[in-house]
Image (cartoon, rainbow, N blue to C red):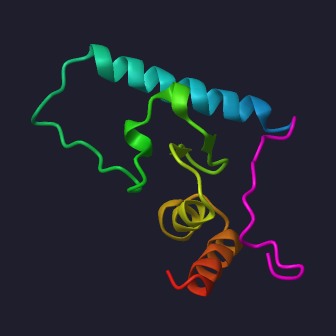
């Protein structure tokens, strides 16, 4: 940390009381989709949706999730400010544009 610049400091996001129920629903939906995928046969003719990012979240055991996005169904298998920045800048369609722009600026500052 240089001076008062905390932009590179890690942050743990927790849902506020107003959004706690929404997050619980997201987690329950993700877990039910995983259980459903484990029990249903996969149709080879059906096009599988590509993962929305490349951080490994689609393969993460729900018990090992370390965080989640409040704007979409993304979960963090590993968390770093860079992973979060790439997610908001490039892979979160529901994030507010101001958040996307701030993430792009942080990544540019880091040379990414």
Q: Main secondary structure of the magenta part?
A: loop
Relative to 106, residue 36 above or below = above
Residue at image position (75%, 73%) is 7
In the figure, residue 6 lies in which quadrant? bottom right
Q: Which range of residues does the magenta coloring cover? A: 1-17
Residue 2, position as x, y percentages in the image: 81, 81
- In the image, taking residue 93 as reference, residue 45 lies left or right, namely left
- In the image, taking residue 55 as reference, residue 40 lies left or right, namely left
Residue at image position (29%, 46%) is 49
Relative to 52, residue 1 above or below = below
Relative to 93, residue 50 above or below = above
- In the image, taking residue 36 as reference, residue 30 lies left or right, namely right
- In the image, taking residue 92 as reference, residue 59 lies left or right, namely left
In the figure, residue 54 lies in which quadrant? bottom left
In the figure, residue 21 lies in which quadrant? top right
Residue 36, position as x, y percentages in the image: 36, 18
Instruction: Report if residue 101 lies within the magenta region.
Output: no
Relative to 89, residue 72 above or below = above
Residue 58, position as x, y percentages in the image: 40, 41
- Total number of numbered labels? 0
In the picture, the quarter occupied by the N terminus is bottom right
Residue at image position (53%, 43%) is 73
Residue 56, position as x, y percentages in the image: 40, 47
- In the image shown, does 39 or 3 lie closer to the viewer? 3
């Amino acid at each position: 940390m240089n001076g008062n610049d905390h932009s590179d400091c890690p942050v743990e996001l927790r849902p506020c009381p107003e959004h706690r129920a929404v997050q619980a629903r997201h987690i329950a939906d993700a877990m039910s989709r995983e259980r459903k995928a484990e029990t249903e046969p996969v149709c080879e003719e059906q096009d599988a949706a590509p993962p929305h990012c490349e951080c490994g979240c689609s393969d993460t055991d729900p018990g090992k999730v370390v965080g989640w996005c409040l704007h979409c169904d993304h979960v963090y298998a590993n968390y770093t400010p860079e992973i979060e920045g790439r997610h908001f800048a490039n892979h979160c369609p529901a994030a507010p544009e101001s958040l996307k722009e701030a993430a792009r600026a942080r990544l540019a500052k880091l040379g990414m």
